[in-house]
Image (cartoon, rainbow, N blue to C red):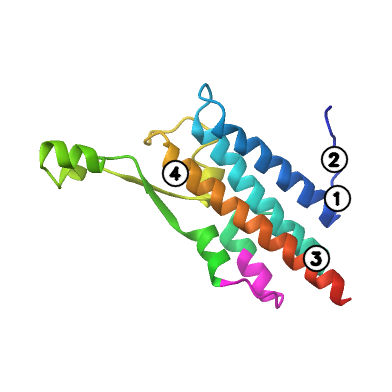
Amino acid sequence: MKFIYEESNNANKWLIMAKEDLKLARLGQERNDIRFELFCYHCQQAAEKSLKALLIFKIGKYPKTHSLDELIKNLEENNIVVPDNIKKEALSTTHYGGSSMLFDLIFDFPLSGLIFPKSKITLNDHAEKDRYPRNHLPIDDYAFKQSLGKADAIIAWVEQYIQNDSQEQ
């Protein structure tokens, strides 16, 4: 079944869409025929839409941006306290790729990262870097799982915030 959403300032619809993006992202745990980048893009979209849902719930509008940094800044400018752990999930860097510890042990070369350098990415980066072909290391299973965990934590926080705030009213 295909759902069509009208442009809306309904926080619940935005949260539903965020959860759908997260469901799409979770398919990366089952599929090996699709690049992790596409699943990570849906992780970013899930986080973005959930933060927009919270803005809509609290102030009835949201800025036109894909930047999680900007959305968090907007939440705080509107007196919504964003916990440090949520900021960390949204903005922290995941290092991936490069050498493995196994390689270092086998070849007794702890500086193998110089030969096989690691790459780094934030949840925000998935909105831009992963939608189109780019010259960067492919996202690996570790980076995918980190992105999934970050998006999951952000959505859970938004849901809890909305539920707690609704009960207080």
Alpha carbon of mark 3 to alpha carbon of mark 1: how far? 20 Å
- Residue type for callout 4: Ala
Q: Which mark is residue 163?
A: 3
- Asked whether the beta carbons under mark 1 and mark 2 sit within 8 Å of each other, the answer is yes
Q: Position of residue 153 (x, y in %)?
A: 60, 57
Q: Which residue is mark 4?
A: 143
* Circle 2 SS class: loop
* Circle 4 SS class: helix
- Residue type for callout 2: Tyr
Alpha carbon of mark 2 to alpha carbon of mark 3: how far? 23 Å
**Mark 1 or mark 4, earlier in chain:** 1
Q: Which residue is mark 2?
A: 5
* Circle 3 SS class: helix
Q: Dot 3, crowdedness within 10 Å: few (<14), some or many (≥20)?
A: few
Alpha carbon of mark 2 to alpha carbon of mark 4: how far? 31 Å
**Mark 2 or mark 4, earlier in chain:** 2
Q: Which residue is mark 1?
A: 8
Alpha carbon of mark 1 to alpha carbon of mark 4: how far? 32 Å
**Mark 2 or mark 3, earlier in chain:** 2
Q: Which mark lies nearer to you, 1 or 4?
A: 4
Which residue is most to the top? 33
